[in-house]
Amino acid sequence: MKNSDIVETTTGKLRGCIEKGLPIFKGIPYAEPPIGDLRFRNTVEKEPWEGILEAVEFGFIAPQPDIVGSSIRYHPQSEDCLTLNIWTPACDNEKRPVMFWIHGGGFHYGGAPSPRYNGEFLSQRGDVCVITINYRLGALGNLYVPDEVSNLGFMDQIAALKWVYDNIANFGGDPHNITIFGESAGSTAVCTLLSMPAAKSFVRRAICQSGALDSQGHHTEGGILASKTLFSRLGIKIGDIDAIRKISVEKLIKKENEIRLEKWDKQDWTGYPPTIDENKVPDHPLLAIGKGSSKNVDLLIGTNLNEWTFFSMLTPKLQLIDWNGLTELININLNKLDLDKTQVEKLIDSFKHSRNNPFEVLNAISTDVTFRYPSIRVAEAQSTHNNNTYMYLFTYRTPVMGGVFGATHALEIPFVFGSLDNTEFGVYPKRDEINSKISELMMDTWISFARSGNPNHNEIPPWPTYDTDNRYTLLFGETIKIEKDPLRAERLAMEKLPFKYRH
């Protein structure tokens, strides 16, 4: 392995490695380790180190439960996890666009070392700097105790953004052209950062993949309930931060996981999401975006056609659901909206017209409620302030298991990163001529957007901006095309539901 040149940063000297002609820097600490007295405290800037830091190995991932099938299942974990990684074509003065990736995992699990997030292909293809980060997860990242602890994982993300802003020029990047992008919880994080005053100086563009803003999310009562449950299970007085700092990380993660699995049995997917507080997230992010909190940020946002199969295929009994069972389950899943049986039945009827059975309708409704409609709401809100707002829909069906997953959740990630050869497991397909072409088009689209705020390029159809009059959407599948207001009937059905995005 060949060494890179030494790079000066505000926190010390770094030396990475050269792989396939690309300088790569891994495991760069961007903040002090949040351990000991710094556990459950706001992120602390990294103190400069002495000598040269050898940045050639990924850092620890955040402590998290064991997830079967995870691409980083066996990667070492530690609370000392606040590191980032950089791929760059050259450490020069070229001022390249910067693409800053925030991983998903429901704010429970995941990490930057996943082979899906290999920045090599994007960096080389687009002459861009690619950044991936780790941040605190679960209660360690988003425990909410009023006036004490909140949104720590988001403060980690902002600290990483600041480090990149301060130093990326020495790695050949432009600090004034940073695009934040993420998937699932990472996309929710991107949307949330658009509402956070502390992130405002660092973000020029944003790409949101399959994760927006739940109307029931961010509210303080949910954060308080999650924290009370955890304190109670740990046998600690509610709100006693000093006591929970002394609990071993192994015990903390074990109790978190027990609570999570119990919730899943009840179709409750909530965990430790961001929470509205006075200073960090002062308003529900959708309302803040609607008021212009990110009016200077260009936005590309979208979802996958069959998001929910990623979850429903893990529950075999759901595949046998009948129409009566579907009505009951939808009513349970939407219980916070206080729908009556007639409203639920009308919703189901709106989704029946192009689907063959209750299981397909369940997946379509759950996809729209959780992913597509919230993303539409963000696009609507942002487009009133910034014309550079674009919507996509990923429609490529994975051939794995005969295609039953369709265009499922997270499937687009290796297409965006060009990492199809790195992800031949689970729902991810082997590279072939068709998906290689789709991947190349998506990479070029993301790169074009990061460069200029306009995703158009010569290999895709002319792509108009998104507005509520036309709702133009680019479909990425075996056919690449523009559609006006795709799945309109389903969108109109969603608009009739009483979603309440409260302060």
Image (cartoon, helix red, strand yellow):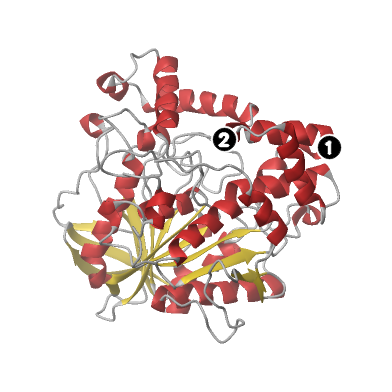
Q: Amino acid at mark 1?
A: Trp
Where 491 sits versus 330, above or below?
Answer: below
Q: Which residue is mark 1?
A: 323
Q: What percent of the width, then of the height, locates residue 262?
A: 58, 24
Residue reaching furthest bottom? Answer: 458
Numbered mark located on residue 490 in the image:
none
Q: Amino acid at mark 2?
A: Trp
Q: What percent of the width, then of the height, locates residue 316?
A: 77, 36
At mark 2, the secondary structure is: loop
Q: Which residue is mark 2?
A: 269
Q: Earlier in the sequence, mark 2 or mark 1?
A: 2
Total numbered labels placed on residues in the image: 2
Question: Which quadrant holds the C terminus?
Answer: top left
The residue depicted at 26 percent of the width and 68 percent of the height is: 168
Looking at the image, can residue 163 be seen?
yes
Question: Which quadrant holds the N terminus?
Answer: bottom left
What distance separates the C-alpha of mark 2 from that of mark 1? 23 Å
The residue depicted at 33 percent of the width and 13 percent of the height is: 237
Left or right: 444, with 296 as reference point: right
